Image (tube, rainbow, N blue to C red):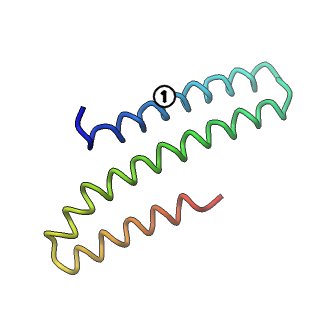
Amino acid sequence: MNKIDEPKKQASIALKKAQTHINKILKMVDNDDYCIDVMTQISAANGLLRSASEKILKNHMRTCFKTGMEKQSEQKKEKLIKEVLDVLSLNNKK
């Protein structure tokens, strides 16, 4: 596996684990499970989603962003920077 594909693989694994947690959460809600247990599973799923997001962002910075910053006009470089800052801002909102 090439170095660029590894973060994508790791992100995919984290997303699949989050999906499993979410399916479990849905069943827990349908079964009227204890609220704290449900919230614990939601926190676990959120952690996995954050982890996947970080891996995808790191991959983006090493590939698309890096290439764009090397080859694009100043206007497009500013757009690339704004995109990353916007995504970081969204990820930091709770």
Task: Tell me the residue at 80%/30% (across/down).
Answer: 37
**Residue 78's image quarter?**
bottom left
55 or 34: nearer the viewer:
55
Residue 32 position within the rendered picture, expressed as x and y whole percent measured from the top left: 83, 23
Left or right placement of residue 30 versus residue 9 in this view: right
- Residue type at the position of mark 1: Lys
Quadrant of the image containing the N terminus: top left
Task: Tell me the residue at 53%/61% (across/down).
Answer: 90
51 or 16: nearer the viewer:
51
Left or right placement of residue 93 versus residue 78 in this view: right
Looking at the rendered structure, the secondary structure element under dot 1 is: helix
Left or right placement of residue 66 versus residue 57 in this view: left
Determine which residue is flagged by label 1: 16
**Residue 66's image quarter?**
bottom left
Residue 46 position within the rendered picture, expressed as x and y whole percent measured from the top left: 62, 42
Residue 74 position within the rendered picture, expressed as x and y whole percent measured from the top left: 20, 80
Task: Tell me the residue at 57%/24% (across/down).
Answer: 20
Please tell me how crowded label 1 is: few (under 14), some (14-19), or many (20+) other residues with Cα within 10 Å: some
